[in-house]
Amino acid sequence: MSSQDIPEDKHLPSEQGDAHHGAVAVADDPFADPGLPVHKPRIQDIDERAAKRSERTVAMLFTLSMLATVGFIASYVSIPVDKIIYVFPIGKVSALNFALGLTLGVALFCIGAGAVHWARTLMSDVEVADDRHEIAAPADVKAKVMQDFADGANESGIARRPLIRNTMLGALALVPLSGVMLLRDLGPLPEKKLRKTVWSKGKLIINQNTMEPLRPEDVLVGSLTFAMPEGLEEDQHDFQVQIAKAALMLVRIKPEDIKDKQELEWSHEGIVAYSKICTHVGCPISLYEQQTHHVLCPCHQSTFDLSDGARVIFGPAGHALPQLRIGVNDEGFLEALGDFEEPVGPAFWERG
Amino acid sequence: MSTATTTERKAPRGERVADWADGRLGIYSLAKANMRKIFPDHWSFMLGEICLYSFIIIILTGVYLTLFFHPSMNEVVYHGSYVPMQGVQMSEAFASTLDISFDVRGGLLIRQIHHWSALIFVAAMVVHMMRVFFTGAFRKPREVNWIFGFLLLVLGMFTGFTGYSLPDDLLSGTGVRFMEGAILSVPIVGTYLSFFLFGGEFPGGDFVARFYSIHILLLPGIMLGLLVAHLILVFYHKHTQFAGPGKTNNNVVGMPLLPVYMAKAGGFFFLVFGVIAAIAALASINPIWALGPYRPDHVSTGAQPDWYMGMPEGLIRAMPGWEINLWGHTLVLGVFIPLLLFPLVLGAIAVWPFIESWVTGDKREHHILDRPRNVPTRTAFGVAWIAEYIVLLIGGGNDMFAQYFHLSINSITWFVRIGFFVVPVLAFIVTKRICLGLQRRDHDKVLHGRETGIIKRLPHGEFIEVHEPLPQGKLHTLTSHEQYKPIELGPTVDENGVERKVTRGEKLRAKLSKGLYAEGNQIPKPTAEEYKEIQSGHGHH
Amino acid sequence: MKKLSARRRHPLAAVVVLLFALAVTGGLYAAFAPAGKAQADETAQSLAIEEGKKLYAVGCASCHGTGGQGSSDGPSLVGVGSAAVDFQVSTGRMPAQQPGAQVPKKRNIYSQAQIDQLAAYIASLGAGPITPTEKQYDPAGADIAAGGELFRNNCAQCHNFTGEGGALTNGKYAPNLEGVEPKHIYEAMLTGPQNMPSFPDSTMPEKQKKDIIAYLQNVNGEKSVSPGGLKLGGLGPVSEGLFGWIFGLGALIAVAVWVAAHTAVWVAAHTAKAKKS
């Protein structure tokens, strides 16, 4: 900071705590430091009986701790791990957890309480003062260090031989790159992976409860159904990755209540299928209010209007939920008419 | 053979062991400097100990948990003893956490101790930090230690977050999903970062194992190093103390490490461990069996992070959904701005000591603590920061507050949006007023003595309250604080008529200095002259 | 008086005054807060003797219209079915007391016979879900684990992992499911009361509803256990955080105060007291 022009010390208070207040100064200055107060004895310092009492208390605490440890071991071997007991007012709890925790707690607490009680009542409580010394080294030490450093640097010749210095710095700067390089295989490149889901034209819409394909007549007005694409199996190795994008919710809204033209077009008799993954940061959004047609995200409260193209009406989400275009196949089952037209889930730089 | 050994008495066994160690480790010199080191006694000086001890408890219990936990995302079907999960498909991480909770004797207790200590650890760090802040203990020579402490807090938060995510339960998985969304929002590199972190698309099969190594090795390793450095510096600097009779900037008053402090501090470790063990016996924490395994298409309401991540959660919940689409790219401001604000809000408290020392230009060492009231602007800033933090915590739990106080989520969110800007300002103003009021009270107490509450009727009928003069020790305590004067920029033209250039930095500094120390921002402390004058005109008041 | 004035300087005086002020405010609030319960009881008295349509005309028609066609104050009841009537009336939600974000559960004022009469009347207006029989909703022998999976997929998003309830938009909420009778849970899933979506048999068969009821009874009922100790509301990290701060850190700070307190001070006070007496 360039503040040499500002008179540095004018606004600093004079050094306080000079520590050398003599008796004369005290008489002169009503606020002077009277020095450490006289030590007040404790009852244990005066009365040996009280001291004995303290001794017994400390010993009792340590003994209690020993007993508690015995209790811990006894609980461990005698209480079955699945035993449930009712403890008022906590409720029905694991007997083992309760017993182990309390005995361990008592065993530990009593050691601490004993030690502290000992320190508080029987060890000396005379306050003493210890001098401090400035952290910064005195000038001669500093001068010696600077000289040593200059000598060492000179002997190395680093200043005289810039070629060595520069190549060394270069080498040291480059070598961590190998470490960075090695991180490359932490994961594959994104490519278009976030843009695609397993939905495609003709895929049946499977009810996640029954694992059967849905028919339009199954989906009633006011109901909520979660679905996934045909062919996605729970024991499939990439199930979690795929369901993270493909999860779907279906509701049926009276066609005359649908305000968005495209939404109506992409629906089937008022059955609309939206991505269940919030466009904010990807929580499965599904708190559907059947009278208002709002869905709320339980994570950050983004609210979407399913009767109006699932546009955002509250909260931190930046864009509407993607809609899946659906229709009915020859056998009367609901089917997807393609993949989502835009990436599902949270927005990202390449989303566009 | 030295002849000395033959003439020496036979040393007791303990001494011989110590001699052996001294010959190799130099322990006597070490002990000479430290064995009777003085530590001042004050409850607020033990907050840091709570942090230290809960950290040790976390390490002890954490090591135990690693013996049973499987950091793997391989899907298995559960066949353990918890009935409502039998036959459910889940990751090995989740299944092994269930096993720890239901099949390992004492496993549930250790899990609960681990988690409770983690919550208490971070909470104690915040309280410890605020103690240091409000008493000005961060001033020279302790700035480096302040930074170490702050880093420990930040690392503690992330260690907590990664640990909370390990069981791969539905709640923590939702948190990890949020993290993925937040990383995706980073312009240009976000998508790549996310793919590298998760080994591909979310959730992939890698993050539990990766978080595991971060949680049990990388972060705690760094923290352990910082912690040791933090403690060495505490020893090296010697502890600060509050002003009082006999306590000066050049001494430290208290009791010696051996035996009193050792018994108290050592005992306190057991007390902390005992209390946390009892809490773990009585109160359930993170019952993952009730939450279920993570599936990216499942969720529960009340999806929350642990409390220390509630602040960023509040930021993200209160943020409006801004999103800019340009030239085929998306700038997700609705997520990215909170992501930036998170370190800014957190860091605001960390940089204050450096701003303050720049403004005061004070290069001296300070070992006597400030009373918060005597530094109104700093105290007000600290309270404003806490107020901001609390507003964001409320934002992070807006659904819980809505549910339990029968309020509307939307109204709470709006409260947080406005409160984010307004509440800290109000807190600042109110705190400053309170500090100045308290300073005035001290001023009056010094000059007029303590109000005794005894009403006396004078012969001519007047009622007065008897004021009792303070003892000298108290007078000293109440007047020993320093008061800076604001910096003056001085004339911009020197005596020779040459114009001096006043840099923008200097102007800012002078302005800040005024804000901190100008009249109206602190009450001048009574002088000895004032005191003598009033005391000589005694009996009047 | 002298004592009081001496004590008002006591450091705890402010706390005492604050507590007093809080108690007074709370008392005043309790005294003046609207007491709606008595009213409901009264209506109960006058309604108890009516039946069927007469019951409807008195209790429901003002909002739902004389023929159940609905009005601006209440939706049409044509086709809601007897299950919806049974749910709404026997959980006390209907008749509603006052408009608001959501009609809350309260004490039911009808007998089961009266409810059945009402339900028969509404069912006659148009076909809808029929009140389930015990065989349909009795959870005995149902698959708890399957119920848990179904619950997490279909219900937890609003009602929380273990059915503790949660907030919805603009003051609406999903209620806590603790202690809700199996029949009512079944009916709620079947009919979708208020803003809750329905889960009809076509998408969630009877057996699955039973599984869900069994799961709920296991995790949030009389029989449910909390192995780890206090459940803290079953709300997750927010209540855990509060507990950790208040009882965890609070207890530790209290201990710290004890550890650091100077013994000489209170001993001096004690001896002074002892001398006096």
Image (tube, rainbow, N blue to C red):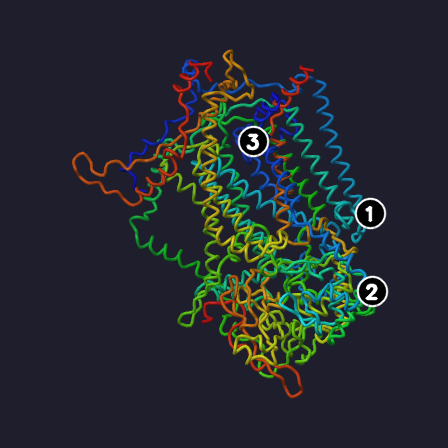
Residue C37: x %, y % from top left:
72, 52
Three-letter amino acid code at the position of disc 1: Ser
Q: Residue furthest top?
A: B459
Question: Who is closer to the viewer here, A289 or C234?
Answer: A289
In this rendering, is residue A56 above or below A235? above
**In the rendered image, which residue does mark 1 sit on?**
A78
Distance from disc 1 to disc 3, alpha carbons, whole Å, reads 44 Å
In this rendering, is residue C258 above or below A280? above
Image quadrant holding the N terminus of chain B, namely top right
**In the rendered image, which residue does mark 2 sit on?**
C113
Sort mark 2 into few (<14), some (14-19) or many (20+) by Cα contacts within 10 Å. few
- In this rendering, do the residues under marks 1 and 2 share a single chain? no
Distance from disc 3 to disc 2, alpha carbons, whole Å, reads 70 Å
Q: Residue furthest bottom?
A: A330
Residue B266: x %, y % from top left:
63, 35
Sort mark 1 into few (<14), some (14-19) or many (20+) by Cα contacts within 10 Å. few
Does residue B76 appear anywhere in the picture? no
Question: Who is closer to the viewer here, C272 or A251?
Answer: A251
Residue A310: x %, y % from top left:
54, 71
Does residue A58 appear anywhere in the picture? yes
